[in-house]
Amino acid sequence: MQLIAGRTAQEYNMRKNRKGAFWEDRYHATIVQTDGHLARCITYIDLNMVRAGAVAHPRDWEVGGYNEIQAPWKRKGVIDFVALLLECRVTSEVAGTRREPAWSEAIAVGDDLFLEALKDEAGSIAVDKRVVSMGSFNVLRGKTSR
């Protein structure tokens, strides 16, 4: 992931003849429980460039996943689109563009039983982690002042 993030930043900076940080923070992984959570996460990622003000719509970001999902490659595609569309019910509709901490701050998204099981499995490294409600999601995250 670090290699992909680095190459994306280099390419963007070169195209825009600019220098400096491209990503706000380091790559953040979030464990998801269900296909529905995965679909929401994919949508959230595809809206990153909209939130950043780089494009008005995810279709305007040529290398984003939105275009590949809406018009799949006929050859050498990476995504099994039939399975993705059936399992996640992905549509061309663009969801809200507000930042959702569930995808940028949480360790995992799912129901309470799933999150508690992950916490138990992590043992001592999860001592300071809590299952909390964050917007419309239940998440596992570190302690916060909230």
Image (cartoon, rainbow, N blue to C red):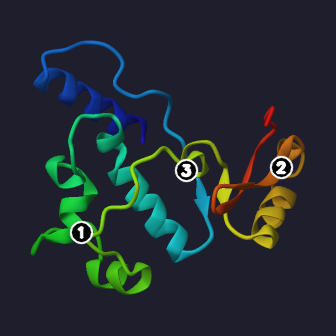
Residue 127 occupies which quadrant of the picture? top right
Number of residue marks: 3
Disc 2 marks a residue whose amino acid type is Arg
Residue drawn 68% across and 67% down? 110
Percent position (x, y) of residue 3?
Answer: 36, 36
Please name whichever residue, 96 or 33, is drawn nearer the observer in this view of the structure: 96
Disc 1 marks a residue whose amino acid type is Ile
Percent position (x, y) of residue 146?
Answer: 79, 37
Residue drawn 81% across and 32% down? 145
Q: Is residue 93 above or below residue 80?
A: above
User: Which SS class for mark 2?
Assistant: strand
Residue drawn 19% across and 29% down? 11
Question: Tag 2 or tag 1, which sits nearer the N-term?
Answer: 1
Q: Would you name the residue on which mark 3 appears?
A: 103
User: Which SS class for mark 1?
Assistant: helix
Q: Is residue 29 left or right of residue 89?
A: right
- Give residue 130's mark: 2
Q: Is residue 43 above or below residue 87?
A: above
Disc 3 marks a residue whose amino acid type is Trp
Percent position (x, y) of residue 59?
Answer: 17, 55
Q: Is residue 26 above or below residue 104?
A: above
Question: Tag 2 or tag 3, which sits nearer the N-term?
Answer: 3
Q: Is residue 133 left or right of residue 53?
A: right
The single residue placed furthest to the top in the displayed view is 19
Q: Would you name the residue on which mark 1 appears?
A: 69
Q: CA distance from mark 1 to mark 2?
A: 34 Å
